Image (cartoon, grey):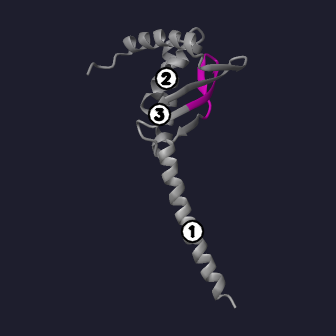
Amino acid sequence: MAAWKLEENIQRDMEKAQESIELYGGHVLKAPNKYEIRTGVVVAARFADKLRRTAFAVFGGIVPREEIVRATSELNKKIYEALISMGVGKLDIVRITVEAAVEGGRLIFGEPKIEWFVPHSEMQKRLEECEKRFAEIRKRIESLLKEIP
């Protein structure tokens, strides 16, 4: 596997950012210097690339490239930790939305909103487990109520 090189990856991200603007948008202007950026629906393992490219698309002409790399790197670490704590797998489908602003030449991100899309088959399995557990609890309550004089 090729080594990660900052300049090559920034150039690739900027090219992909332009493509992203033309095809998907990926951001909403909420107020002067305040944006909402979105990954769209992506495989969890690819969220960082998508966020960084969207940030380049939105902020490329506003803040220096190094600032975009720094800020998105910090955001990606935060999101990665959240995904791990939620139990999201690398191949699970997620959508991430985060507000961003430029303040004093720095890119500031708010708290990310993470949506985790669970396949229907998995939800069906979870629902069946919940229904089984609920039936057990109901039986225990009914049994306890019978013991009350």
Pointer 1: what residue?
A: 135
- Decide which of tag 3 and tag 1 comes sooner along the chain: 3
Is residue 110 part of the magenta span, yes or no?
yes
Q: In the rendering, at what x and y percent does residue 137 appear?
A: 58, 71
Query: Mark 2 falls on what kind of element?
Result: helix
Q: Earlier in the sequence, mark 2 or mark 1?
A: 2
**For discs 2 and 3, the disc positioned in front in the rendered view:** 2
From the image, give the main secondary structure of the stretch colored magenta.
Answer: strand
Q: Which residues are magenta?
A: 96-111
The residue beneath circle 2 is 50
Residue 58: % across, % down: 59, 15
- For discs 3 and 1, the disc positioned in front in the rendered view: 1
Residue drawn at (46%, 42%) of the image: 88
Tell which of 14 and 101 is nearer to you. 14
Instruction: Depth check: give the residue in front, 138 or 85.
Output: 138
Q: Is residue 93 above or below residue 35?
A: below
Q: Which residue is mark 3?
A: 77
The quadrant in which the N terminus is found is top left
Element marked by disc 3: helix
